[in-house]
Amino acid sequence: MSTQTFHLPDVGEGLTEAEIVQWRVAPGDTVNVNDVLVEIETAKSLVELPSPFTGTVGEILVEEGATVDVGTAIITITGGEGEPDSDIGQSEHGEKPAEHADAGGAVLVGYGTGGEVTSRRRKPAEKPVTRAVGVVAKPPIRKLARDLGVDLSDVAPSGAAGEVTRDDVIRHAEQASVFRNIATPDLPAERELSIPVGTDAAASTPAGTTAPREGDADAREEAITVKGVRKATANAMTSSAYTAPHVSVWTDVDATRTMELVKRLKASPDFADVKISPLLIFSRAVIWALRRTPMINAAWVETENGAEIRMRHYVNLGIAAATPRGLLVPNIKDAQDLNMRGLAKALEKLTVTARDGKTTPADQQGGTFTITNIGVFGMDAGTPIINPGESGIIAMGTIRQKPWVVDGEVRPRYVTTVSGSFDHRVIDGDGISRFIADVASVLEEPALLLD
C-alpha cells in the first residue's frame, strides 16, 4: 500500500507561509479527492485545502496553530491512488492548472502560483452540517460563531430546515453595523498565541505556540505573536508610509441631500432587495471624481529604467473592512462600469464576504483607489495611509446633524467630513484639492451624478 505525503501548497498568493487553523480530518478517516483536509490562514485569507489523493489519513504532521513554510509536509494519506475528478485539472478558463509538487515550490492541484485563487473542489449540496446534538449549522456559520464567541446552542435558529443562519448569529452577538462587520468579542480567559513577558514560560516556549497560563494571572504585560493579516498589514503600511510622501487634506460637507437620496432609494421597489447606505453615494461620488481627475487613480511604479507614473483607465475600488482577522481591503473590479444598483449589490457582496472571513486573495489584488469608512466608528476625519500600489485613499467620516449656515440662517443639517491622503510624487496639490472638492460637491448635490 503506497503512502502519499501532502505538502503545504502555494495557494496562488505568492506567499511563503501559512498557519494551520483547523484540521477537518483525523488519522484513520477515509478521504476522497477534493475532500477538505484542513483550513489554513495566510496573510490574506482563510483557505480550505482539498485532498489531491484518495485513501486513509495516516499521520497529521503539523499541529493546529502552527505556522509553517510552503512545501512543508503536513499530512500523509495511505491506500488507494485515485485519479482527480474530471473538473480538477481544468480551470474555469479552460487552462490546465499546475500539478501538486512534493518539493518546496509545492502548488496545489487547482491553484496557480499567482493571481486569482480558484478552488477545484466540487461544491457540495447545500445542506446543513450537524456537529452537536440539536444544533444545525453550515461550516461558515460555525466559524462566524467562533469568531464572535457565540455558543450556537444558545442561538435560536430561523432557517427553513431548522438551521442556524448567519443573521441568527449576528443578531445574537448584537451586531450593530455591517461595515464594522462583526462586534469584537470579549477577551477569553486564555489568549491564543500569547506569551507573558518576563516569565520563564516566555523564554522556554517556542515562537508561535501558547505559553502555559498557570501562575501568570497577575502578569502586567503580554506578548502577542505578529503574523497573518496583522503581519501583512504592518509590513504594507510601514512600506507605504516610508516610501510614498503622504499629503492629507479634508473639508466639511453638507450631506443633507445625500441622506435624502438614501431615504428615497430605500423606499424604491428597484432597490428593495439591496442594502442602501451613504457609502453607496460616497462610492459613486469617488468614481465620478476620479474620472474628472484621473491622476488620482494612477500609480508610481519603479522599473529597471527608472520610475514611471502608470495611468489606469479603470477603477478597482477598494473598501477597507474591519474583520475578525484584521484589516482587509477587497476591491470591486471595474467599478466604473456599474450603475447605482450594480454598485450597491457589489458593496453588499463585498461586505458579507469580508464579514464571513471568505475574502479571497484575488479580491484584494489589483486595487486602484481605496475608501475607508471611518464614520461607522464615530470618527469625523483622519489621515489614512495609502494602500500599496495606489496613489490615494479617501475617508468618509460620520454623518451627524450639526448647525450649518444656509442662506444666511443657521439650520440643522446632516454634515460629514471628507478627508484623504495622497502620494505627492504622483499628484500635485491642485489635483488633490480638486478631487476632494468634487467628492464633496456630489455629496452636497447628488444630482451631479446624472451628468
Image: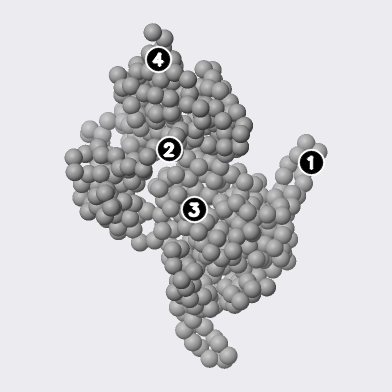
Question: In terms of sequence position, does the residue under pointer 3 or pointer 1 come before the other?
Answer: 1
Q: Tell me the residue at 72%/60% (across/down).
A: 294
- Packing grade of label 3 (10 A; few <14, some 14-19, many >=20) is many
Residue lying at the far left in this picture: please name it. 133
- Residue at the image point whose x is 34% and y is 58% from the top: 175
Looking at marks 4 and 1 on the same chain, the residue that comes earlier in the sequence is marked by 4
From this view, report whether residue 450 is shown above or below residue 84.
Answer: below
Three-letter amino acid code of the residue under disc 2: Lys
**Structural distance between the alpha carbons of marks 1 and 2:** 47 Å
Q: Can you give x and y, in whole percent of width and height, for residue 92 in the image?
A: 57, 37
Splitting the image into 4 quarters, where does residue 369 fall?
A: bottom right
Dot in front, 1 or 2: 2
Query: What residue is pinned by disc 2?
Result: 123
255 over 187 or under it: above or below: below
In the image, what residue occupies the spot 58% across and 26% down?
A: 98
- Left/right placement of residue 350 relative to residue 30 reads right
Residue located beneath label 3 in the image: 350
Residue 388 seen anywhere in this rendered image of the structure: yes
What element does badge 3 sit on?
Answer: helix
- Quarter of the image that includes the N terminus: top left
Could you tell me how far apart the alpha carbons at marks 4 and 3 are, in whole angstroms?
A: 41 Å
Find residue 402 and name its label: none
Identify the image's colour scheme: rainbow, by chain, secondary structure or one colour.
Answer: one colour
The amino acid pointed to by label 3 is: Leu
In the picture of the structure, the residue carrying the numbered disc 4 is 80
Residue corresponding to mark 1: 306
Indicate the secondary structure of the residue bearing disc 1: strand
Q: Of circles 4 and 1, which is in front?
A: 4
